[in-house]
Image: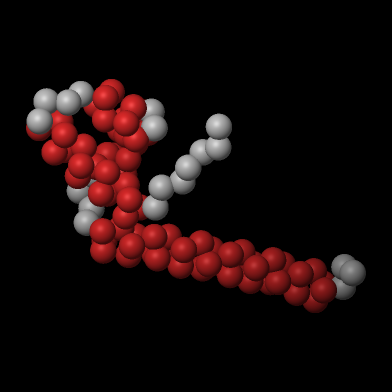
Amino acid sequence: MAKKRFRSEEIIHKLREADVLSAQGRTVAEIVRQWGVTEQTYFRWRKEYGGLKIDQARRLKELEQENARLRKALSDSIIDNQILREVSKGNF
């Protein structure tokens, strides 16, 4: 069975829905069974997205993408710097 990847907005919506359903007396096991995910996934989502609003989740995703881009740029510049040091020593 193929895994379905939920967007952060969907996860936040599902967590709010879970709060409402649990207040109505449904158990976590029933809720996650309805969604088709495991309890472990539910609790991981609560840990990561529990107090976020949708706009905050979007901003978090943008920051993570920017962080990844900056890390790649830094690693490329470090490699270029090492190559230039080797060339300047005459080890080519």
Q: Is residue 66 left or right of residue 46?
A: right
Q: Is residue 85 visible?
A: no
The image quarter in which residue 19 lies? top left
Q: Position of residue 52 (x, y in %)?
A: 23, 53
Quarter occupied by residue 39: top left
Determine if residue 1 is in view.
yes
Count numbered badges in the picture: 0
Q: Determine the residue located farthest toward the right in the rendered image.
A: 92
Residue drawn 63% across and 71% down? Answer: 77
Q: Which quadrant is the N terminus positioned in?
A: top right
Position of residue 67 in the picture relative to residue 46 (left or right): right
Asked if residue 66 is positioned above or below residue 5 in the image, the reply reads: below
Q: Does residue 51 lie above or below 26 as drawn?
A: below
Q: For the C terminus, give its image quadrant.
A: bottom right
The residue positioned 20% from the left and 24% from the top of the image is: 27
Colour option used: secondary structure
The residue drawn where x is 38% and y is 28% is 38
Q: Is residue 83 above or below residue 19?
A: below
Q: As drawn, is 41 to the left or to the right of 31? A: right
In the image, 85 versus 15, the foreground residue is 15
x and y percentages locating residue 53 in the rendered image: 22, 56
- In x, y percent, where is residue 15? 24, 42
Residue drawn at x 10%, y 32% as measured from the top left? 23
Q: Position of residue 59 (x, y in %)?
A: 32, 64
